[in-house]
Amino acid sequence: MALSLHFHPLSSFCHKALIALNELDIEVERRFLDLGDATQRAEFLARWPTGKMPLLVDGDRVVPETSVIIEYLAKRYGRPDQQLVPTDEDAAQEVRLMDRLLDLYVMLPMQAIVGDRLRAEADRDPIAVNKARGTLAMAYGMLEERLADREWAAGEHFSMADCAAAPSLFYAATLVPFGESQRRLGAYFGRLMQRPSVVRTLDEARPYFKFYPYREGLPEAYSP
């Protein structure tokens, strides 16, 4: 097995893949990717033209897109006692739905807000940022409702959806904190933060949190 993961330690989508790797107890060669380096960027774009991280390389096979990576790893190298995507079709559909909801309505608007702060002040877009904050608030309400009868994002077992939830909520909460009306969501986030796979991922990212644009909002345990 010659597995390698091209990643950046601050990337929420990379955290999603790393949490899955920890859950599945799969060791890979981790290749730190600095897209600001012209040589690394050119080499990476030659391998995957979208330039999106993370990227899994398994021998001659290139596997992009975080959810695809997780399903690929789980199917080929996963542990039989840890199914990040269940074999039951209905349960698997719920996992994939929650995974999509978290990526589209938490992860992406969170990244839009963070990305806007990285721009020169003259290039910032407050209208887009306010829209993204509204999307996060909507997503929090949706998650609060869905968590009424479940311990984890898609049911009673930790799944790919929770791999998406941990990093997306970790960063999103620094932008739009959970409110009094989102107590179930807050409790769920607490469970995520105690999950060993999540703890390990965040601990490994700790030296880089000083570069996070909204680091003042990080939980005290991870404040640089």
Image (cartoon, rainbow, N blue to C red):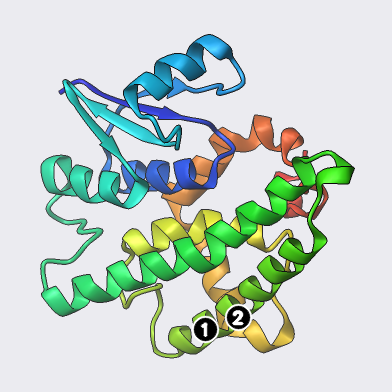
Looking at the rendered structure, the secondary structure element under dot 1 is helix
Whether label 1 touches label 2, CB < 8 Å = yes
Residue found at the very far front of the displayed protein:
123
Which numbered tag is attached to residue 138? 2
Q: Residue at point 22% right, 62% down?
A: 85
Q: Position of residue 26 (x, y in %)?
A: 26, 36
Q: Position of residue 11 (x, y in %)?
A: 55, 40
Residue found at the very far top of the displayed protein:
39
Q: Position of residue 172 (x, y in %)?
A: 65, 61
How many labels sit on residues?
Answer: 2
Q: Is residue 92 above or below residue 64?
A: below
Q: CA distance from mark 1 to mark 2?
A: 6 Å
Residue bearing mark 1 = 142
Q: Residue at point 38% right, 83% down?
A: 150
Amino acid at the residue labelled 2: Met
Q: Residues within 10 Å of mark 2 (few under 14, many from 20)?
A: some
Looking at the rendered structure, the secondary structure element under dot 2 is helix
Q: Nearer the viewer, residue 218 or 50?
A: 50
Q: Is residue 194 visible?
A: no
Q: Is residue 3 visible?
A: yes
Q: Residues within 10 Å of mark 1 (few under 14, many from 20)?
A: some
Q: Residue at point 57% right, 67% down?
A: 190
Judged left or right of residue 173, residue 124 is: right
Residue found at the very far right of the displayed protein:
122
Q: Nearer the viewer, residue 212 or 65?
A: 65
Q: Position of residue 62 (x, y in %)?
A: 24, 30
Q: Nearer the viewer, residue 171 or 53?
A: 53
Q: Residue at point 55% right, 23% down?
A: 35
